[in-house]
Image (tube, rainbow, N blue to C red):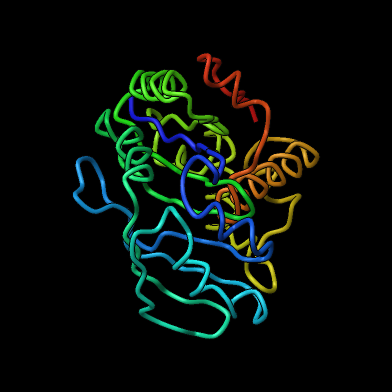
């Protein structure tokens, strides 16, 4: 079954280590990622930060040993779009992640970690990738795993119950201003208690925010890597 995994790797094992070490308040996001077997990987990169932190970014990129060439394409002040060519060490990681015919859906960095969201055709493909990466000495960690066998809601870390509750709330007008349905009516429609509805919505909202905002760093990834299924009860 298809699986989306959220993975992290230290910047000093991947890309822009010296740039990220030199400035603490910048974030990096890949604008375009290429799937299995690319000749050029992750060419377009957004870098954003404060005015002071962005002032020396051009020079840092030129001196960063992970970057072969850099071209500034767009300057919006607090964020810039670059086209980067990477050294071979960087592309090795990308090829490892995509060797099992996986696709990198998202890649970003804040601080000294790179975060990836990768779609694997099978759960076994993820296990093979993790095993191979660690055998090669890379500190690849699995943060979250989403199975896609029960619908597209799995992409967002939602259980079936959470997904159905959000759909009912949206269609019922719970998120309208003013609301067309209150918690009591919604809980009656779903045949659950007011407390259960409140907790389910909070968990669902948290999952959506986490998916949209960040890929967290947690210790549950080591258990996930061993094949332990995530809890999906509420």
Picture coordinates of residue 115, whole percent (x, y)? 52, 45
Numbered marks: total? 0
Q: Residue at x 70, y 35 (%)?
A: 192
Q: Nearer the viewer, residue 68 or 136?
A: 68
Quadrant assignment, res 147: top left
Q: Residue at x 46, y 37 (%)?
A: 154
Looking at the image, residue 191 lies above or below residue 227: below
Picture coordinates of residue 145, whole percent (x, y)? 50, 30
Q: Residue at x 56, y 48 (%)?
A: 211
Residue 201 falls left or right of residue 10? right
Residue 41 falls left or right of residue 47? left
Looking at the image, residue 76 lies above or below residue 104: below
Residue 91 falls left or right of residue 174? left
Quadrant assignment, res 177: bottom right
Furthest residue toward right: 195
Q: Nearer the viewer, residue 203 or 217?
A: 217
Quarter of the image with the N terminus is top left
């Amino acid at each position: 079954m298809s699986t989306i995994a959220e993975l992290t790797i230290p910047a000093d094992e991947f890309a822009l280590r010296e740039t990220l070490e030199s400035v603490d308040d910048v974030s990096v996001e890949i604008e375009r990622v290429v799937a299995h077997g690319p000749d050029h990987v992750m060419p377009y990169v957004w870098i954003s930060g404060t005015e002071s932190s962005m002032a020396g970014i051009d020079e840092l990129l030129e001196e960063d040993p992970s970057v072969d060439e850099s071209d500034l394409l767009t300057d919006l002040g607090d964020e810039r779009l670059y086209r980067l060519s990477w050294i071979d060490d960087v592309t090795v990681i990308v090829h490892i992640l995509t060797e099992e015919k996986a696709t990198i859906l998202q890649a970003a960095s804040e601080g000294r970690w790179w975060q990836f969201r990768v779609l694997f055709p099978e759960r076994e493909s993820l296990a093979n990738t993790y095993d191979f990466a660690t055998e090669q000495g890379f500190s690849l960690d699995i943060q979250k795993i989403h199975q896609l066998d029960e619908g597209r809601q799995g992409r967002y870390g939602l259980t079936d119950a959470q997904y159905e509750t959000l759909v009912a709330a949206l269609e019922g007008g719970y998120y309208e201003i003013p609301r067309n349905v209150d918690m009591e009516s919604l809980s009656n429609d779903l045949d659950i208690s007011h407390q259960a509805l409140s907790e389910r919505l909070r968990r669902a909202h948290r999952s959506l925010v986490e998916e949209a905002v960040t890929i967290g760093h947690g210790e549950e990834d080591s258990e996930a890597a061993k094949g332990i299924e995530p809890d999906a009860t509420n």
